[in-house]
Image (cartoon, helix red, strand yellow):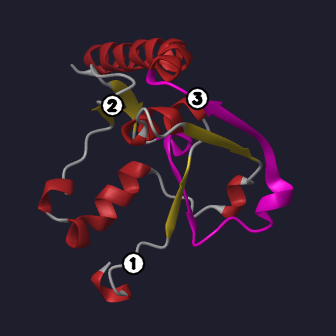
Amino acid sequence: MPKIGGIDPSISLHDDWQTTCIIASGYASSEKKVHLFELSVPAVETVGWTLYEVAQRGWQHLGAQYADHAQWFKFPSPAVPQGTWFDSMLQRTERYGLYSVPHLQSRLRNIYVFDTLSQLQTAVDPFVKVMAERQSASATHSRKAQP
C-alpha cells in the first residue's frame, strides 16, 4: 500500500449476499440503512486470489499479525455479535476487483435495503447457521484425517 500512495484500489466482492450484509452491519445505524447491490460480475474479472492467499502474500505490507492466517476465521459484527464462520480458502468468501466494476449500470440486478439491524440479523441468520455447520464438519474431518 505505501508503494501506491496508501490508496487501496481493491473492491471486495462477495458471492454470498449475506457476507456483504454482515460486514455492512458495522456501518448501520438509526440514521444509516444498509443498501445491498446485487451485481453480475464474472469471476474471470476478479483478481482470483482467496482471502487466505492475500494474507499469505500480503503480510509484508499488512504487518506480521497477518502472516499466520487460519483456514477458518470467525468474524464478529453488529448483525452477528457472536461471530460468523468464514472459510478463507474459498474464493466465494471474498473476491477482489481493482478500481471499479466495468459497466456497473448494466450489471446491476437488484438493490435491497435493510432499514434496521434487526432486519439484517433476521436475513443472515440461516446463513450463519450453515457456515457454523460447515466449519464444524471441516474441523471434524480434519481431526479424523490426522493419524
Which residue is situated farthest in the front direction here? 31
Mark 2 in CB contact with mark 3 (< 8 angstroms): no
Identify which amino acid the numbered label 1 is placed on. Ile
How many C-alpha atoms fall within 10 Å of the one at disc 2: few (<14), some, or many (≥20)?
some
Q: Find the distance from the CA under tag 2 to the CA under tag 3.
A: 16 Å
Mark 2 in CB contact with mark 1 (< 8 angstroms): no
Identify which amino acid the numbered label 2 is placed on. Ser
**Label 2: which residue?**
77
Q: Nearer the viewer, residue 103 or 47?
A: 103
**Label 1: which residue?**
7
How many C-alpha atoms fall within 10 Å of the one at disc 3: few (<14), some, or many (≥20)?
some
The residue depicted at 24 percent of the width and 72 percent of the height is 61
Identify which amino acid the numbered label 3 is placed on. Phe
**Label 3: which residue?**
114
Q: Find the distance from the CA under tag 1 to the CA under tag 3.
A: 29 Å
For label 2, the SS is: loop
How many C-alpha atoms fall within 10 Å of the one at disc 1: few (<14), some, or many (≥20)?
few
- Residue 95 highlighted magenta (yes or no): yes
Image position, residue 132 (x, y; %): 39, 16
Q: Earlier in the sequence, mark 2 or mark 1?
A: 1
Q: Earlier in the sequence, mark 1 or mark 3?
A: 1
- Quarter of the picture containing the N terminus is bottom left
The residue depicted at 41 percent of the width and 72 percent of the height is 8
Q: Earlier in the sequence, mark 2 or mark 3?
A: 2
